[in-house]
């Protein structure tokens, strides 16, 4: 029963109201449990279809290997929690290193005299 599983595993993790979870979708159940235990995430994991999620602007293909949530990276798999931590860390570093754009005025000595006419 879908309604019972939603109550049991918390709010659904999905792209929109038109995407229904399938009964017995073990990947979605595992991702839902994972999201409940990781409430301070930068972005929500959004379900698009069975095993396909997005996290921010990243598309993730999620699978279960050896009872662990794994995400497809290149030709292999890595642990979902480790991958999301790395993505969050890189996003935090990028946000803290925003650089103001360089503005060159007409009287700036770095400009060529040909351009100032």
Image (spheres, grey):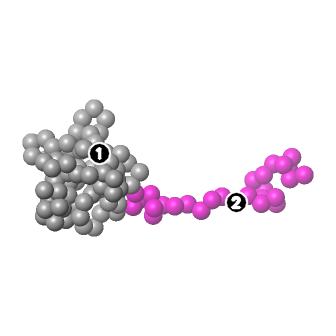
Residue receiving disc 1: 49
The residue sitting at the right extreme is 117
Give the CA separation, mark 1 to mark 2. Answer: 46 Å
67 or 110, which lies in front?
67
Q: Horizontal and vertical percent for residue 11?
A: 23, 64
Q: Nearer the viewer, mark 1 or mark 2?
A: 1
Q: Horizontal and vertical percent for residue 24?
A: 13, 48
Quadrant of res 101: bottom right
Mark found first going from the N terminus, 1 or 2: 1
Residue receiving disc 2: 103
Q: Is residue 59 above or below residue 95?
A: above
Residue span colored magenta? 91-117
Q: Is residue 90 left or right of residue 76?
A: right
Tell me if mark 1 has few (under 14), some (14-19) or many (20+) residues whose alpha carbon lies within 10 angstroms of its own.
Answer: some
59 or 10, which lies in front?
10
For numbered disc 2, what is the local secondary structure?
Answer: loop
* Residue 31 lies within the magenta run: no
Q: Is residue 9 visible?
A: no
- Magenta segment main secondary structure: loop
* Number of numbered discs: 2
Q: Which mark is residue 8?
A: none
* Residue 109 lies within the magenta run: yes
Quadrant of res 3: bottom left
Q: Which quadrant would the N terminus be assigned to in this image?
A: bottom left
Q: Is residue 112 visible?
A: yes
Q: Horizontal and vertical percent for residue 74?
A: 31, 35
Q: Which residue is pictured at 78% across the width and 56% down the height?
A: 109
């Amino acid at each position: 029963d879908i309604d019972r599983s939603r109550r049991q595993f918390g709010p659904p993790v999905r792209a929109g109201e038109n995407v229904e979870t399938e009964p017995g979708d073990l990947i979605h159940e595992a991702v839902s449990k994972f999201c409940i235990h990781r409430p301070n995430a930068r972005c929500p994991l959004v379900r698009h279809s069975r095993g396909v999620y997005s996290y921010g602007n990243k598309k993730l293909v999620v699978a279960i290997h050896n009872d662990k949530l794994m995400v497809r990276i290149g030709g292999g798999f890595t642990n979902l929690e480790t991958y999301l931590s790395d993505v969050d860390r890189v996003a935090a570093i990028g946000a803290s290193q925003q650089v103001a754009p360089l503005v060159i005025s007409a009287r700036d000595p770095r400009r060529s005299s040909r351009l100032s006419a």
